[in-house]
Image: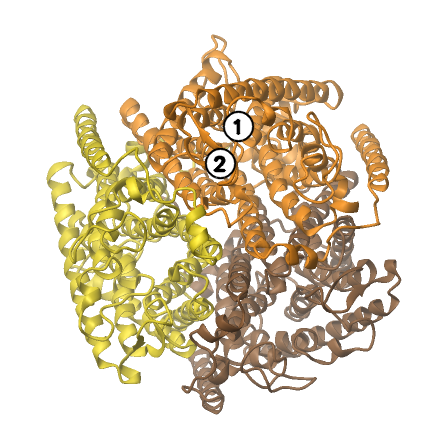
Chain colours: A orange, B yellow, C brown
Amino acid sequence: MLSVLGKTKAKVALLVALGVAIFLSSAGLIYAQDAGGAETLLGDANAPVNFTWTLMAGFLVFFMQAGFAFLGAGLIRAKNTVNYMTKSFMDFSIATLSFWAFGFALMFGGSALAAGLEEGNLWIGLSGFFLAGDAYDVGTAELWLFQMMFAGTAATIVAGAVAERMKINAYLAYSFIIGAIIYPLYGHQVWGGGWLSTLPFGVGAIDFAGSGVVHAVGGLVALAGAATVGPRIGKFNANGSANAMPGHNIGYVVAGTFILFFGWFGFNAGSTLAATELRISIIATNTLLAGAAGAVVALYFTIARTGKADIVMACNGALAGLVGITAPCAWVAPWAAVVIGGIAALVMLGSVKFVERVLKVDDVVGAVSVHGAGGLWGLLAVGIFADGTYGNYTTDAPLVTGLLYGGAEQFIAQLISVVVVTAWALGAGFLVFWVLKMTMGLRASREEEMEGLDMPEHGMEAYPAAR
Amino acid sequence: MLSVLGKTKAKVALLVALGVAIFLSSAGLIYAQDAGGAETLLGDANAPVNFTWTLMAGFLVFFMQAGFAFLGAGLIRAKNTVNYMTKSFMDFSIATLSFWAFGFALMFGGSALAAGLEEGNLWIGLSGFFLAGDAYDVGTAELWLFQMMFAGTAATIVAGAVAERMKINAYLAYSFIIGAIIYPLYGHQVWGGGWLSTLPFGVGAIDFAGSGVVHAVGGLVALAGAATVGPRIGKFNANGSANAMPGHNIGYVVAGTFILFFGWFGFNAGSTLAATELRISIIATNTLLAGAAGAVVALYFTIARTGKADIVMACNGALAGLVGITAPCAWVAPWAAVVIGGIAALVMLGSVKFVERVLKVDDVVGAVSVHGAGGLWGLLAVGIFADGTYGNYTTDAPLVTGLLYGGAEQFIAQLISVVVVTAWALGAGFLVFWVLKMTMGLRASREEEMEGLDMPEHGMEAYPAAR
Amino acid sequence: MLSVLGKTKAKVALLVALGVAIFLSSAGLIYAQDAGGAETLLGDANAPVNFTWTLMAGFLVFFMQAGFAFLGAGLIRAKNTVNYMTKSFMDFSIATLSFWAFGFALMFGGSALAAGLEEGNLWIGLSGFFLAGDAYDVGTAELWLFQMMFAGTAATIVAGAVAERMKINAYLAYSFIIGAIIYPLYGHQVWGGGWLSTLPFGVGAIDFAGSGVVHAVGGLVALAGAATVGPRIGKFNANGSANAMPGHNIGYVVAGTFILFFGWFGFNAGSTLAATELRISIIATNTLLAGAAGAVVALYFTIARTGKADIVMACNGALAGLVGITAPCAWVAPWAAVVIGGIAALVMLGSVKFVERVLKVDDVVGAVSVHGAGGLWGLLAVGIFADGTYGNYTTDAPLVTGLLYGGAEQFIAQLISVVVVTAWALGAGFLVFWVLKMTMGLRASREEEMEGLDMPEHGMEAYPAAR
């Protein structure tokens, strides 16, 4: 107890000191640029509709947090519900602060996408800390809000994979780090003007709404986390075979999937950051079609295999379809969205078996397969199905063309991005969880795990005796 | 098991063959029109705000699926929760694919509302299949996305009425058919340029956001389905009297109603498809007032009758009010919305008795009364309360005037529409469910029904033993 | 039973008579101004984007009702779930009707913010009843819809504080009164052109999105209600110490908090009523940062105090942060939002102790501390942290400056507003609940309370025996 407090205090003190130092060096209380918005409005008559679109879409992405909370809670046992929901709620809150203080600057510094983001290089961003100084600007805040929701999504993907045995304080520490460092550094490569985006193949490595930047990063860090913390007691038998450990509320799983699907429209279509890009209607259409195709393929696949209509797999199929279409959503035709979504479901189903049977990793909710495998597939799908009708976030940019339409080069760029994100997310993920394991300790005690983490770590049960 | 698989395979093969044939004949991979959106933007400076409005509203309508899932799940017994939620989730996914492939073209072909929708006649649409060819266009995708959400709503209304005894594979087959054929054909009559919209009374039969097109169709097909599959074991006694069969979670009922209410703002106000129609504010206001009035009338009615504040009836009252205002929402004043919503609640309450006591049909959630009866009332309400302040989706069109303001003709058009939708939805509904009964079989075995459908059909329980 | 009916009938008759009289005197069926919207559009090319923004934000605020329903339901015992959810659902429905008929006119009459709102004075508004006459206008309906959602929020805040023992019919009567009178009268002072807004200090008393108008009013009326109805049986021991009475579903608490957080983006950023005020991006950013900071501070505070990660307190911390930033959200920098949110969590934690230990009031969900104490802190925070970068709802208005930036006068105006809202909400709250106690009776019988209110008042349980 005391050592926990001591560590917490030391950590907080260190962070506050670091924060104040960077804050003051970022101009701190002196603000600049256009904090009222009048100047920006004068310069761009379309700013109001683009702000409306981007902010509303960002709010929808925020709501996906509730979807993750429900989905994961449904798939775990009742005795860990408070623990899971605490992680799900707090990882977003903590990542919000770390992405505000550090992550956003490391990711978008140098991109010049908005005011106060001028400094940075091919490897890392170096301006925009704390939204202070020149970054106290309406355009920068708009970008931050939308991007923050994505950072939060990446963070929370991990919670499901490591559920039911990772200690809450270790998980909260991880949340800070993914928002501050792990997520932004690969993100800078693709969205912040970094090296991958400058590759001399096709239009460079691209990822419209984050199959790679958000989902593959989250899913692969989840793999590192689940592997490092080890399987739940009772998951694997001595001979290596796995036991099913059913969750406690299937209704929550469906509810969570609906909420995620709903938010995904903002996730994908909002990523234009502009309503003046009318391609948003095709993006939303592709998103819906891919999710539906993923659900249908996964459901009929399980019916064909087992004779049972497995709704959990159908939900994961829908989510895999959505993850898969996230990178290519803006560059493919509706028929291709159906194909991409259907294949994503099959990729997810194969990955679930692979993770459990080959890797022997206990991924409680299938996060590695839905987000990790689905995300890598999405990156590749850009290089296959992009049909040359749309450019990189605008019709004015060079059009994106994949293998099916003669664009082999784009596929190469995507392949390189797949390699980089896999290496980075696994490498950084294993490192962080190893360090946490060595310092704070990752895993609850055997007694706590058997009892469930809710009482030992939170002092309350999810469902106190009724009446 | 084998025969199920065989049938599934044959069905899938047939559909795929049909699909590919139509797809190729629709120009397939060759796209045209404005898939990037630059041209559309150039031609219409208001396109971004109208796209923003329509797409965001469509997303809200999507979220109503979660509302239906919660509402129905709360009103059924725990042992059928997985089954109900699977139907609720999959009917939308399947209807998405069938409306994309076939339904949208049958409904809007010939309407010329967007690119690629030129061919069609007074009875049926014949272009826009698969959003391929000329229909691969930002304007067409915008229309499709919004309309798809409506088709999905009609589909899922049926799930509640036939809950707790209809087999999952029969229900999934029905889902495909309502999205591909039943919903679009009446829809073409009203929104796709078909015969009813050309009636020489008033401005022709109209239905702003779908009291008839969506809710009456869904509610009356639900009546056909519930009647064909028969009542649940134990619902009716030998003497014909009915037993109450309480659901398992009242909180879900309230949550579902809130979500539906929330989505309904998009459903009604979004139906302008344009933010430049500022009438949207009055539409949203009317929607809120009618729903609130329905809730209050239903609650105080049950308090007066039984002394108990029946929240389930209050929720159904709110929903009936919302269904009732859906057709007239754009053409009436706020005071009339209150009256329409209040009457809708009374119509719903009367219909519940009628369906149970006279028709002896077991409608588990009251879908027939809320959506069917409420929807027909909504169509008539247009002909009574329309006050001549607004036209058909625009202020430039001839103004709509009902009985109270001297417009007897409009009432006649609405009456004809009521007759047509009733005949079509009941006729098509009974035919489809009869065919499914004769081929796949509609009803779970007595043993399965007694046990609950979750284990036999899905291999899982909604609430696996905790801990 | 009969006397309940008699009272209900008399009340309804009185209200209807009053309603019809005012309705007819407000021009009633004769409408005027711009009900179609064409004229408004002609006069303001930005009207569509501003309508889109305001209406969508209003819909988000509506959805907060579902958040309150879940949050409260999770914190009470299962035996009162139907009762709580009925209150949560019906207070909004009833407040909708009373705010439509009376409240809106009393609040915004004289503000001239839209058509039909010309009459009123420094103390009370006197036009806009029933949205009739000149108030049947697209601009007025837009304002009404957004404001109605706020009135409904204030109403429902009270439900949680008085849960588990207040009779449903007394609560419903209160709902009518807060929407018709209590909420609008202070609201007129701040947002309707009333006296407080004309104070000669700073720019007058201000409150961007309602820390005071909505939350402090709701939270302080809740205090009056909880004090008047008295504590639940078993809450306090003979020696005055309090017992913990855990709720029944922690997952609902987290879900409710997520939904409230989601809706809060509309609550705060939508309060510009205009997307042309690009400050909306900074408002949304501040909202997120304050909520996250509140959650983090409350969580680590409880970890430091008890060694347990108390998710209920973290949720209340997030909500307190959101309440606290609601007034200052438009006038402060991101770093200040973090500080304001963090302090709000501490204020809430202190208030919880104060209410329970000093006031000996049984506030079941902490509504008094989150909304009341948090709301008053928010009003003061404007006077401290406003940094002079933005005016009152527009960049053209005089800029708002707080203590930290040399603006002592604004702090005085805020302090006066704190005194007024406290006096008004407590005074009116105690009066209303005292009158209800003397007439209808406030409190369920001892037997009903012990059994739970669900069966006696509603004739149903929340979770009927499964299967």
Dividing the picture into quarters, in which one does residue B237 lie?
Answer: bottom left
Label pair 1/2, CB-CB below 8 angstroms: yes
Q: Which mark is residue A203?
A: 1
Amino acid type at image mark 2: Gly
Q: Is residue A112 above or below residue A223?
A: below
Q: Which residue is mark 2?
A: A391
The residue closer to the viewer here, C109 or B147, is: B147
Chain under numbered label 1: A
User: Which of the two discs, 1 and 2, labels the residue nearer the N terminus?
Assistant: 1
User: Residue at position x 29%, y 22% from top?
Assistant: A305
Q: Tag 1's secondary structure?
A: loop
Relative depth, front residue between B423 and B253: B423
On whether disc 1 and disc 2 are found on a single subunit, the reply is yes
Which disc is residue A419 wearing?
none
Q: Work out whether A348 lies above or below A42.
A: above
Residue B419: percent from the left, percent from the top? 16, 66
Q: CA distance from mark 1 to mark 2?
A: 9 Å
Q: Where residue A28 sits in the image (x, y, percent)?
A: 83, 45
C193, C353: nearer the viewer:
C193
Quadrant of residue C280 within the rendered picture: bottom right
Quadrant (top left, top right, bottom left, bottom right) of the N terminus of chain A? top right
Asked whether residue B443 appears in the rendered view, the answer is yes
Q: Locate residue C17 relative to residue C355 in the image: left or right.
A: left
| Disc 2 element | strand
Three-letter amino acid code at the position of disc 1: Val
Residue closer to the observer: A391 or C202? A391
Label 2 crowd bin: few (<14), some (14–19), many (20+), radius 10 Å: some
Residue A359 rendering spot, x and y as whole percentages: 51, 13
Q: Chain of mark 2?
A: A
